Image (spheres, rainbow, N blue to C red):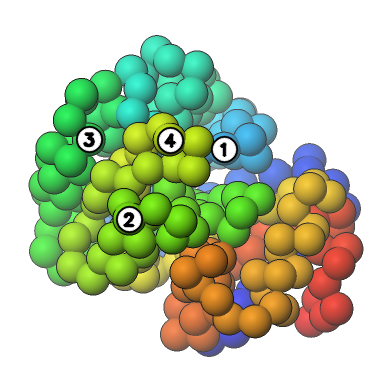
Amino acid sequence: MALHLAIHDDPASNARAVTEQLDSWGRDALAARERFVVSLAGGSTPPEIYRLWAETSQLDWPRVDFLYGDERCVPPDHADSNHGMVRAALLERLKAQPRVFPMAGENPDPTAAARDYEQVVRDVLGDDGRIDVALLGIGGDGHTASLFPDGIALNKAALDEAERRCVANRAPDGSDRLTLTFPELRRARRLMFLAVGEGKAAILQEILEGPLQPKRLPSQTLLRDDALECHLFCDRAAVRQLKSTE
């Protein structure tokens, strides 16, 4: 299954396309399975998308479940909290609330928090259930979720994890993170990657067209796997270094 690349003129038109696609997939999921399960991404691109989604969507929100792809190990009222960002950009703008399952970034024991979240995911999905859409970003170093290049032992263990659904990890700046694992993300029905701005152009070209080095560029693990249904939503600035956009 080839990567689906959707290119839009600017971040605003990309955000509109993303929200329209999410709504379309959501309606299909609700019709087929009575609920729509999305794992949410943090970072600088999603807030605009979340605000627009809240303003325009007609989804039956009480039948939508939100998990998180990753989280910083900070309290939810901290400026770096993904859940805090989602709450301000999306949840507080909705008239009806989805079911939301944040990661416990405030837990002083990240390993325990990761194990607790595995049980949350199991409770939401069941043993054989799947996330409908996993929203993911692409970092300047090629990471996705909080799965970073294998520069330190903790990162290597997270990249190599073959069974667990959620693990504790550490960012290159030394901050602790919680993240869904590649096995869990691979189970998702669809992966939706977001990349906008000229600052993503070089790394996107390397990830998509450069040598396959998934330990150095973790997002290649998903984006270069033809067995997965991956959708990459970009603006023109982000793809300007790609040799092919077909």
Query: What's under tag 3, amino acid-wise?
Result: Pro
Which quarter of the picture shows residue 193?
Answer: bottom right
Q: Is residue 125 visible?
A: yes
Compared to residue 243, the image places residue 49 above or below, namely above
Q: Earlier in the sequence, mark 4 or mark 3?
A: 3
Q: Are marks 1 and 4 in contact (CB under 8 Å)?
A: no
Badge 1 crowding class, 10 Å Cα cut-off, few under 14, some 14 to 19, many 20 or more, is: some
Report the residue marked by disc 2: 153
The disc label shown at residue 110, or none: 3
Residue at 72% from the left image edge and 79% from the top image edge: 209
Q: Is residue 8 visible?
A: no
The disc label shown at residue 174, or none: 4
Identify the element where label 4 is drawn: loop
Q: Are marks 4 and 2 in contact (CB under 8 Å)?
A: no
Badge 4 crowding class, 10 Å Cα cut-off, few under 14, some 14 to 19, many 20 or more, is: few
Q: Nearer the viewer, mark 3 or mark 2?
A: 2
Badge 3 crowding class, 10 Å Cα cut-off, few under 14, some 14 to 19, many 20 or more, is: many
Report the residue marked by disc 1: 43
Identify the element where label 1 is drawn: loop
Q: Could you tell me how far apart the alpha carbons at marks 1 and 4 are, in whole angstroms?
A: 17 Å
Q: Are marks 2 and 1 in contact (CB under 8 Å)?
A: no
Q: Could you tell me how far apart the alpha carbons at marks 2 and 1 are, in whole angstroms?
A: 24 Å
